[in-house]
């Protein structure tokens, strides 16, 4: 514990004496603010005293009792020594208000109760809040002010001001002056200034200027009421030269430190492969070409002497190219050694920013040539194209085909050279027989050229993979590669095993006979085989397993007459919640409610929800079962048992009956989003008024109301929900969503209308298909024409069913699904 910790009522202090005398005291600070030492040690007042100061006081008190052991004046001469530590740490109730993300009351342990920790627990200070004038109102009325810049920028903090005691209030006010500094500054940010602080303090907070700063003129942008933006030039060089001056700043000032534009740079550049160390070098007055070459450690052995280039920056900063020869300046004594000829007339002087390019012989001839080999080889990558290198040489060196196992996995019939077409950006594909090249057949080899890319393939890449699929009562239905000797039993294991609801099952294998690249579709026949799946299917000997062939489709299902127990779950405000088995295939929700004993008095049937798992048979291979919600009108279902709102239950359904929430949430483009108490006499406008009314830009024509049961309604200002005289009202548990103009509330919903059990505006789910939304609205009504379902997209396009093709498209956000009703007299 920090020895600057300030003690208060309720703290437990542990005093230990060790050495030739051993004592241990556990003492608690009383409500009057003191501890009492045993053995007539007396009272020591501790309120407002730090642990460090308490140790001094305790040492002095104990030295009076045990003076032969403890010497308070000369501790090093003592025979026994005193330690004071904090024992049990109390909890403090603290408050934080003002410009923080989550104002309110917080409980912190006394050991960690500081302003910084409390602000952290409150979510931090808002952008609008002050970090430099944080006030701490103590229980005795005293107010301390903290500047957290001391902590964040310098790592220092007044411990006494920062420590909090029970009942303290931390108040974070609005910042009064925020200025921004950018450009050539070490820490460009937005800073808060207080009092008479000005530009010099701002630069100090930002860490000072970078070496590239230009101080003769900086630009200050200032916003002035009734005038707008004005721009001011500030000479920082003269300002910082006078220690008595400062430059006042106001709220929202933006200071830009401009970069230093260096007209001439004191450097020269030598580049190219003809020098040992190309690069940038310091320019010195009188420097010559020879001096620069010597700085670059001389010419390389393959330097090209016939031509070099000089690019000179003129007075007007235009560039001028001059070519020259190095033959009159250097002579080659022997291979790789160049010596200065002494011809000072050719050793011309350089100027600042000169750029000298010295080339190499091989560079002038096109540099090193290379080829690349990739694919099914042991050493893929780029390699130098040596003179007279053949395709065989490259394949032998990099392919690794001396390894017989590797060669057996290689596709030898064909490989390719990808070659650039000269003068174009196009490429040409040159095939060759890799097997013949490896065998040394000269007729199969192709001459290599610079930048050729050789691509070699494996047998696996060139062989189409056969697959099989599995669906039904397995945990992970999907498609799988057909490996050698794969059986039905193996496929079940690969699919995660049988599901919990799989009892006595069989595998139905659908097989297409006569498949092949040249197969006539008219001659392909399909056969179906039913294979019993034994309980120990995974351990069956190979001779008892059922082998699979390419493109077999396996469905795992229960044997006819064997059907798992169909169950549903109901929870919430019913008399007897729990799992129930369905008494028949067409049991409805009204009958289930009766079997539970009915609702409790707290029940809110208007908010009832039903979750249903999509049938595995409707899934595509690889998809996971998903649960979706179905909008219920439970009140209507109970009033009219057997009617269209009284849904037929399915295995795995989960029904939840909530209690009455008694609230309505308003969010979006209102002044104060709130959760309000429900009032039966209130209309939509009443709730919006209580939330402060609309913000500017609110889209009043696209307000959405989401009921507790998931049903959504879109309303416009002036509609029936707004009429204060209307008898209709917003139901408990509803959420009122007010969008901004252009926010397109419709994009988050899908409207289902027409011949469905319960037309509704439902929440959009990414990737959900047509069937999902139809199920959500209770499915087709009795008069629905299921061949005439139309999906109107937001962009104006229309999706419809074609002929007898399956029609279950993914429905984009904002779509309208219309289920057409059969005409009167139409067939059922």
Image (tube, grey):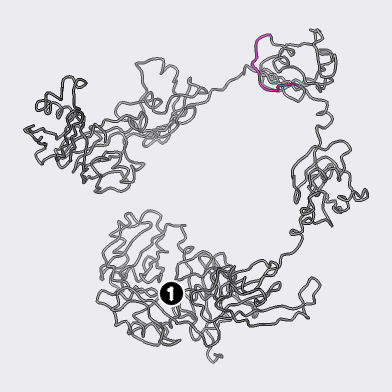
Q: In the displayed image of the protein, which residue is found farthest to the front?
A: 20
Query: Residue at point 21% right, 46% down?
Result: 93
Above or below for 136 versus 198:
below
Image coordinates for residue 122, horizontal then vertical, percent: 30, 46
Looking at the image, which is closer to me, 782 or 790? 782
Name the residue carrying label 1: 630
Q: Quadrant of residue 757?
A: bottom left
Q: Is residue 750 left or right of residue 527?
A: left
- Magenta stretch: includes residue 279: yes
Identify the main secondary structure in magenta: loop
The image shows residue 418 at horizontal and vertical percentages of 81, 48
- Residue 547 screen position, x and y as percent: 68, 75
In the foreground, 572 or 802: 572
Q: Residue at x 84, y 36 (%)?
A: 386
Residue 715 is covered by the magenta coloring: no
Residue 197 drawn at (x, y percent):
33, 26
577 to 97, vertically: above or below: below
The magenta region covers 275-286
Image-quadrant location for residue 490:
bottom right
Number of numbered discs visible in the structure rendering:
1
Q: Is residue 12 left or right of residue 429?
A: left
- Residue 487's place in the image compared with 586, above or below, is above
In terms of image quadrants, where is residue 463?
Answer: bottom right
Element type at mark 1: strand
């Amino acid at each position: 514990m920090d020895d600057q910790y300030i003690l208060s009522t309720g703290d437990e202090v542990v005093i230990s004496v060790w050495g030739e005398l051993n004592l241990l005291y556990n003492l608690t600070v009383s409500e009057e603010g003191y501890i009492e030492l045993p053995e007539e040690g007396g009272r020591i007042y501790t309120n407002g005293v730090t642990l460090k100061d308490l140790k001094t006081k305790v040492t002095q008190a104990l030295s009076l009792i045990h003076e032969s052991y403890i010497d308070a004046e000369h501790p090093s001469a003592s025979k026994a020594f005193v330690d004071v530590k904090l024992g049990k740490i109390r909890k403090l109730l603290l408050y934080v208000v003002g410009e923080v993300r989550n104002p309110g009351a917080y409980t912190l342990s006394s050991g960690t109760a500081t302003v910084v920790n409390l602000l952290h627990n409150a979510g931090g200070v808002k952008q609008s809040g002050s970090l430099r004038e944080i006030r701490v109102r103590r229980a005795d009325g005293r107010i301390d002010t903290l500047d957290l810049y001391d902590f964040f920028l310098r790592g220092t903090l007044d411990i006494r001001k920062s420590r909090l005691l029970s009942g303290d209030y931390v108040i974070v006010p609005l910042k009064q002056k925020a200025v921004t500094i950018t450009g050539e500054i070490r820490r460009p940010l937005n800073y808060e200034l207080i009092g008479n602080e000005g530009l010099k303090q701002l630069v100090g907070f930002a860490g000072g200027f970078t070496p590239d700063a230009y101080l003769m003129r900086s630009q200050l942008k200032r916003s002035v009421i009734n005038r707008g933006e004005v721009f001011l030039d500030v000479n920082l060089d003269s300002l910082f030269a006078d220690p008595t001056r400062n430059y006042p700043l106001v709220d929202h000032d933006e200071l830009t430190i401009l970069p230093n534009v260096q007209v001439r740079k004191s450097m020269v550049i030598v580049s190219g492969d003809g020098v040992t160390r190309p690069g940038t070098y310091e320019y010195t007055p009188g420097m010559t070409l020879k001096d620069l070459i010597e700085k670059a450690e001389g010419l390389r052995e393959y330097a090209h002497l016939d031509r070099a280039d000089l690019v000179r920056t003129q007075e007007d900063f235009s560039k001028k190219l001059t070519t020259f020869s190095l033959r009159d300046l250097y002579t080659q004594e022997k291979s790789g050694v160049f010596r200065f000829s002494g011809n000072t007339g050719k050793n011309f002087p350089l100027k600042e920013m000169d750029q000298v390019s010295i080339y190499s012989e091989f560079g002038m001839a096109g540099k090193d040539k290379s080829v690349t080999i990739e694919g099914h080889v042991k050493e893929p990558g780029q390699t130098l194209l040596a003179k007279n290198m053949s395709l065989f040489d490259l394949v032998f060196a990099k392919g690794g085909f001396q390894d017989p196992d590797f060669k057996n996995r290689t596709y030898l019939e064909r490989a390719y050279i990808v070659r650039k077409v000269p003068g174009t950006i196009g490429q040409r594909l040159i095939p060759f027989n890799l097997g013949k090249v490896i065998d040394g057949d000269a007729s199969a080899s192709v001459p290599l050229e610079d930048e050729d890319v050789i691509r070699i393939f494996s047998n696996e890449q060139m062989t189409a993979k056969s697959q099989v699929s599995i669906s039904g009562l397995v945990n992970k239905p999907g498609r799988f590669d057909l490996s050698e000797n794969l059986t039905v039993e193996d496929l079940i294991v690969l699919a995660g095993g049988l599901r919990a609801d799989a009892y006595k099952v069989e595998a139905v294998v659908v097989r297409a006979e006569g498949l092949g690249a040249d197969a006539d579709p008219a001659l392909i026949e399909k056969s179906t085989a039913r294979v019993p799946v034994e309980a120990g299917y995974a351990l069956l000997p190979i001779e008892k397993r059922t082998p699979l062939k390419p493109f077999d489709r396996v469905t795992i299902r229960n044997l006819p007459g064997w059907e798992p127990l169909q169950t549903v779950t109901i929870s919430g405000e019913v008399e007897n919640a729990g799992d129930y088995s369905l008494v028949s295939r067409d049991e409805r929700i009204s009958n289930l409610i009766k079997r539970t004993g009915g609702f409790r008095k707290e029940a809110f049937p208007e908010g009832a929800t039903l979750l249903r798992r999509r049938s595995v048979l409707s899934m595509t291979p690889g998809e996971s079962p998903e649960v979706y919600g179905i909008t219920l009108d439970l009140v209507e279902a109970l009033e009219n048992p057997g009617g269209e709102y009284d849904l037929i239950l399915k295995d795995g359904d989960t029904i939840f009956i909530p209690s009455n929430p008694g609230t309505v949430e308003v969010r979006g483009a209102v002044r104060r989003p709130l959760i309000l108490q429900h009032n039966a006499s209130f209309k939509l406008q009443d709730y919006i008024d209580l939330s402060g009314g609309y913000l500017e830009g609110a889209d009043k024509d696209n307000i959405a109301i989401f009921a507790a049961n998931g049903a959504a309604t879109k309303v416009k200002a002036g509609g029936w929900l707004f009429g204060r005289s209307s008898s209709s009202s917003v139901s408990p548990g509803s959420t009122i969503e007010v969008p901004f103009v252009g926010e397109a509330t419709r994009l988050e919903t899908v409207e289902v209308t027409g011949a469905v059990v319960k037309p509704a505006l439902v929440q959009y789910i990414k990737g959900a298909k047509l069937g999902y939304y139809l199920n959500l609205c209770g499915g087709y009504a009795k008069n629905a024409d299921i061949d005439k379902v139309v999906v109107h997209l937001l962009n104006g396009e229309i999706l419809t069913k074609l002929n007898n093709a399956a029609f279950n498209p993914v429905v984009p956000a904002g779509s309208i699904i219309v289920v057409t009703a059969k005409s009167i007299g139409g067939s059922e």
